[in-house]
Amino acid sequence: MLRREHAIAEYQGGKIIPDRLGQKQHGHYVKYAERMLRIYAKGVGQTRRELHRAVWSVFGSEPDCPARRIEAFCKLLDDRSEYEDDRGGKAAALRRKVFRMAASKHPLLRRQDRLFGTEEAVAKSEIAESLGRPWEEIETDLFADVFEFRRLKRFEGYENAQALLARYNVAQVQVALFDAESMTVWATDDFKTILRYAKLARLMHTIQRHGRHGYAIRFDGPASVLRTTRRYGVAMARFLPALIACREWRMHAVLRTRRRGWTVALDVSADEGLTSHLPAPDDFDSSVEEGFAAKWGEEVREGWRLVREGGILCHQQKVFVPDFLFRHEDGRTVLMEIVGYWTPEYLEAKQATLRLFAEERIILAVAEQVRQALPGLPNVVAYKSAVRVKAVLEKLKIL
């Protein structure tokens, strides 16, 4: 991610608008991005400072590129790079040795003086001969442990120039979120992915039904229970790429400004064209789910329509998103969870979850291999290799 010093944003009507490179206004930036990627791809062995100077030179004649934007590009390129690391302290040891040998020759002069001093070139030659290495090689290693002088070892790169520009747009929204004290996401799809990544980012949540098919999910952290805090802004920023990879969502964050008591809003949605570097969520977690959905199809069967991951069950910080939701024409809903062959630990955790939501109307499609490991569970439909639509419809009639 970027750092605060890379942030570029405008403020309009109580809202913050992070810097964004658009196709219409910044279409020519694609060529700049291609040049920057070539600099790093061919830059193995060069120092970080040399690479950054080369990136700056790319924008030498570009009037619409503030310094922070160039520094942001350098940071994003560095994030995909591996630099040599002098963990053994070889550079520091070499400096001590060279400086000790040069001390007796001081002052060093460009040209030797008649009265005192040693010519610099002569001193370097004598030190190189004493160490048994060319001076150019010694000079390369002398400050290898300094951040700017570390040399590029490997560049992982980006898929293409557009991917680098897309990453920049997302990164600017992320750095704006550093000052967030709360975030609310309204979603109608990919609930399981949204909640899984929020958990990985160590964000707490509260969930409320929003409309007929959606939910409003408010994210914060443990300390927010005690007081207003921006402590979790970085966690929200880490969560953002996962959210962008999902479908049908919009986000509203409240950001605390440096001016005491003043806040601004940050609004982003799935319709704004932001592209995540994370892959889009899979439509199905298993081939059994995919096969059942394909058999059911888009049609309404006996008044029931099938919706993938259409419902969320929440108890305190425990969230359960069953695989499918059946919605009847009269408004009734029934959930369905498919339990395949998994480890004993998985089955034990699944049982605990189902007991927690025992009052809910849930059909359990359970693989015959594990049926005996899940005793006492109601509304079970057993299957061998595929869940039968007819068996599920029979169960729906009695729920």
Image (spheres, rainbow, N blue to C red):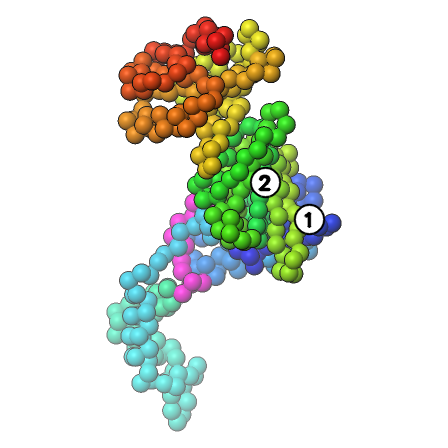
Question: Rounded to the nearest whole Å, what is the CA distance between mark 2 and mark 1?
Answer: 15 Å
Element class at badge 2 = strand
Q: Residue at x 35, y 25 (%)?
A: 351
Q: Earlier in the sequence, mark 2 or mark 1?
A: 1
Magenta includes 155?
yes
- Give the number of marks: 2
The circle on residue 48 is none
Vertical relation: 366 (above or below) 225: above
Q: Quadrant of residue 267?
A: top right
Vertical relation: 60 (above or below) 120: above
Q: Amino acid at mark 2?
A: Thr
The circle on residue 184 is 2
- Kindly identify which residue carries mark 1: 15
Mark nearest the camera among 2 and 1 is 2
Q: Amino acid at mark 1?
A: Lys
Magenta includes 69?
no
Q: Which residues are magenta?
A: 146-157
Q: Left or right: 174 with respect to 108?
A: right
In front: 276, or 302? 302
